[in-house]
Image (spheres, rainbow, N blue to C red):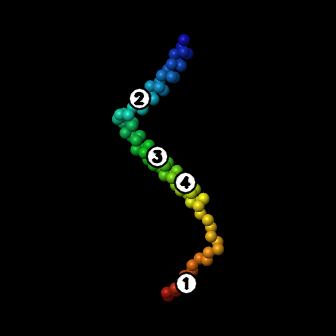
Amino acid sequence: MKQHTSYKVYFILPLLAFFVGCTPNANTYYNRQMQPIVTKYNVLFNGEEAFEIGKKALDEQYQDQFDEILPVEPIKNEW
C-alpha cells in the first residue's frame, strides 16, 4: 500500500508544479528575476541562429571569380 501512495505523489507533485508555474498572472519574485535571464538567452540564441542562416546563404551564393584583374593603384612615397 505504501508503494502505491508514492506513485500518486510522483504523479501529483509534477502536475501541481506545472499548473502553479504556468499561471499567466504569476507575479512572484522568482518570475521577475527569471524574465530578464530568459530574455537575454532567447536573444542570444535567436541571434546566433539568424547569423548561421545568413552565413549559410552567403556561402551557397558566393562564387569565386579568378579571371578578373584586381585594380591596383600606385602608392605615393611622401618623404
Seen at 42% across and 31% down, the residue is 21
Q: Amino acid at mark 2?
A: Val
- N-terminal of the pair, mark 2 or mark 4, is 2
Going from the N terminus, do you reach mark 4 or mark 1 first?
4
- Which badge, 3 or 1, is on the more N-terminal residue? 3
Q: Earlier in the sequence, mark 3 or mark 4?
A: 3
Verify CB contact (< 8 Å) between mark 3 and mark 2: no
Left or right for 16, reference 4? left
- Are there few (<14), some (14-19), or many (20+) residues within 10 Å of tag 1? few
Q: CA distance from mark 3 to mark 4?
A: 15 Å
- Which image quadrant is residue 37 in? top left
| Residue position for label 3 | 42
Q: Disc 3 marks which amino acid?
A: Asn
Task: Give the mark toward the camera: 2 or 4.
Answer: 4
Q: Pointer 1: what residue?
A: 74
| Secondary structure at numbered mark 2 | helix
Residue occupied by mark 4: 52
Few, some or many C-alpha atoms within 10 Å of disc 2 (few <14, some 14-19, many ≥20)? few
- The residue depicted at 39 percent of the width and 37 percent of the height is 31
Badge number at residue 20: 2
Residue at disc 3, secondary structure: helix
Q: In which quadrant of the rendered image does the N terminus lie?
A: top right
Find the residue positioned furthest to the bottom. 79
Q: Position of residue 32 (x, y in %)?
A: 37, 39
Residue depicted at x 49% and y 20%: 9
Could you give the CA–CA distance between mark 2 and mark 4, rounded to whole angstroms? 37 Å
Amino acid type, residue under disc 4 in the picture: Glu
Tag in front: 4 or 1: 4
**Measured along the vertical axis of the image, is residue 7 above or below residue 50?**
above
